[in-house]
Amino acid sequence: MRIALIAVLFAATSAVADVPKEVREPESSPPLSIWRATADGGAEHLQSGLICPSGSGPFHRVATTVFDAFGLDVGCSYASPEATLTVYLTRRSGSDIAAALAEAKRELLQFGASRHPVALAEQSRADFGLLWTVVPYDEDGGLRSSIWIADLNGWTLEYRTTTKSADDLAMSSRLGAVTDAIRNSAGVRLALCARSQAPRRGAALMKRTKEISESSLMTSLLGAAAVSAAQESPVQTLPEPTWCFEDAATKAGYNLVVARGVRADGSDANADQVTLLTQERPPILSVASNSLAAVLAE
């Protein structure tokens, strides 16, 4: 899942204290159907609303990564002359935080084996507005690597840090600013999605030619009515809904993500969106109710 990136990061941190300040690794080019650039140089994760800034304190972002086919397991990696930090956000499906922690421990021990990590006491901490499980490891060369894991409204938020043991306390304090940014982006959106109820949908396949013909005729009439109404009175523009991930699927070899629209109060916005996952700007199919029902009711 995260094997390639983790292997690279562990190799890089073996001499983390020797990295000169002027060194900057090139930013990766993540799929535009999963990540998009923000105006201030950050990267926004479209499936969760997570925003990874271009930098935070002494850290600069060196990679924006996707670990699955649907953008539901992603990471942002940061580096400074003295430390590395990776932020992971993963949508849980059929597993819990304990399973995520076990996987994180396994990865750290496997790819950090050359630095002989020794686990210290596991901690439960209420920091930065979240409940964390923290597992620190002492490693060769006076390094300290730590795993931080917490629930974020049904998604798993994980930090992986490596720094000098003497600087571990400073690293912990810097995570406060990182967490604030995450709670103000993905945290807000995922909380709204978590408290909203997915609408019930139903449909029946039309098989008879007469039904299809009548449906097409009605669609044309309704479309004409909508155009006429728009010409007679100004169209009221509704606020853009918040898009909440609902489902993912592979159809005819293409990966698709389905999202439902939710209003600011958590109610159903009567809108759905299907995104084709592509490297370049993705095609998006949006289906939403409009003011036509109100027109017909008048």
Image (cartoon, helix red, strand yellow):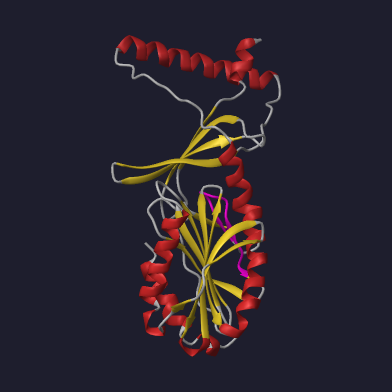
Q: Is residue 38 visible?
A: no
Q: Quadrant of the N terminus?
A: bottom left
Residue 159 drawn above or below residue 59: above
In the rendered image, residue 14 lying in the magenta stretch gets the answer no
Residue 245 drawn above or below residue 128: above
Q: Nearer the viewer, residue 276 or 65?
A: 65
Q: Nearer the viewer, residue 63 or 95?
A: 95
Q: Residue sitting at 37 percent across and 75 percent down?
A: 111
Q: Which residues are magenta?
A: 43-55
Measured as percent of width and height from the top left, residue 286 is found at 50, 35
Residue 179 image-quadrant placement: bottom right
Measured as percent of width and height from the top left, residue 185 is found at 63, 53
Q: Quadrant of the C terminus?
A: top right
Residue at the extreme front of the image, as rendered: 121
Q: Residue sitting at 59 percent across and 73 percent down?
A: 60
Residue 102 image-quadrant placement: bottom left
Measured as percent of width and height from the top left, residue 28 is found at 47, 68
Q: Is residue 137 visible?
A: yes
Residue 18 drawn above or below residue 146: below
Q: Residue sitting at 64 percent across and 55 percent down?
A: 183
Q: Nearer the viewer, residue 208 or 201?
A: 201
Measured as percent of width and height from the top left, residue 225 is found at 58, 15
